[in-house]
Structure formats: structure tokens, C-alpha cells
Amino acid sequence: MVAPRPPRPDAPAVEVARVAAAAPDWETLAAAARPCVACPELAATRQHVVVGDVPLTGRPRFALVGEAPGASEDETGRPFVGRSGALLDLLLAEAGLSRAEAAVLNVVKCRPPGNRTPRAPEVARCSGWLRRQLELLDPPVVVALGLSAAKWFLGPRTVLAQVRGRPHPLGGRAVWATYHPSAAIRFGPNGAPRAGLLADLTAVAGTLP
């Protein structure tokens, strides 16, 4: 599968991509991302740029990529630490996976006001950070959590029900698209998103060395 051609980037997106591409390591990249003001509305309302979590040592076994930070993430500066994060940790454990071995990232690094869905220009402007994170970390497997993340990897016309449940070769790694933990919370413990998310994480676990 070939990555879709993105829309022509605007000047802030070009600058983010330039700065991100020049970062030689994770620490430099994180330091460059934290003061980012490419999206003025997000920069004006956020508390933290949520750069992401990485394993303390070595290459991550896999990466988890969500949509954007929520209130708890914006407050703490760390990804997936609220209700969605607690459920994600639980389901990872049930699937035989450890968050400590994963990179935990988001498509957009700043919380959109009111937890709204990130807008296309915001996704485009933040893409340089995520692209460079994936280059530096080089996870063999990526789990895209929710439709926004799935679209970032697989294209704007992606339908989650049509792409989940199997790996998609992309850029030398396997990309799995599945439900976001927030959908599992919304539909309850017996809902299809929770069961599907657990099934997909279990399938991912079966592919890892």
C-alpha cells in the first residue's frame, strides 16, 4: 500500500516539517515541539504540548497512535492518562501487551478546545512531528486508535469497519487500525468497540516477536 498524497501544506506545516526533520534524536525533537505555535487556536488554549511517551530503553515493540490529547493529557503533558488511557492499559494487559514496551503518540499534540475533532489544517501542521517520531523510533508495528489516526495512515476516505482486523503494510511497517478507547467507553463494557479493540490488540500481540 502506498501512502496517500496529502494536500499541499501551508507555511506553518512546512516549517514544522523542516524543524522536525532536522531533529537528530527524540530529546531534540521533543524540545522543538513543546513551544510549537503552528496552530494559533490550539496554542492559545492548551496547557501542554503532549509530545508522547517512549520506552526507557531501546526500540519500541509497537506504537500506539491516537487522535489528540484530552483534558487529563493536556493537564499532565502525557498521552492516554485519563479514562481512555486506563481502559487502554487494561485491554493491553488482557491482550498480553505492555505499555512500557510501546511508544504512545497522537496525531495532534495539543488538545483541541472542548475535545473537538482536530481540523484538517491542524492535522497537516502537526504531521511533521509524528512523521519524524516514527522515523526516529522505527516501530515495526503501529496501532492507529480511532478514525482520525486511521485516516492519517491510510487516507482520508478510510472507513474503520473496512480496514480493521488486519495489518496494512505501509512505509516498511504494519499498520493496524482499530477503535479508540473512548469509543469503547461510550458504548459500554459489552459494546462492539471494546470487544473489537481487545480482539485487534490480541491479534497484534500475536504478530510481535
Image (cartoon, rainbow, N blue to C red):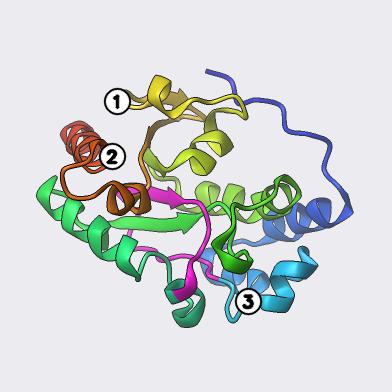
Q: Above or below — where is 41 with respect to 137?
A: below
The alpha-carbon separation of the residues under discs 1 and 3 comes to: 34 Å
- Which is more toward the observer, 106 or 206? 106
Q: Is residue 56 magenta?
A: yes
Q: Are marks 3 and 2 in contact (CB under 8 Å)?
A: no
Question: Residues in magenta?
Answer: 50-71
Q: Which secondary structure, mark 1? A: loop
- Which is more toward the observer, 37 or 32? 37
**Nearer-N-terminus badge (2/1):** 1
The three-letter code of the residue at mark 1 reads Gly
Q: Which secondary structure, mark 2? A: helix
Q: Residue at x 89, y 53 (%)?
A: 11
Residue 198 placement (x, y as % from top left):
19, 41
Q: In the figure, residue 7 lies in which quadrant?
A: top right
Q: In the figure, residue 156 lies in which quadrant?
A: top right
Residue 88 placement (x, y as % from top left):
26, 56
In terms of secondary structure, what is the magenta stretch mainly? Answer: loop
The three-letter code of the residue at mark 3 reads Arg
The quadrant of the rendering that contains the C terminus is top left
Q: Which residue, given by chain and number where applicable, does mark 3 sit on?
A: 46
The three-letter code of the residue at mark 2 reads Pro
Q: Which residue, given by chain and number where applicable, does mark 2 sit on?
A: 193
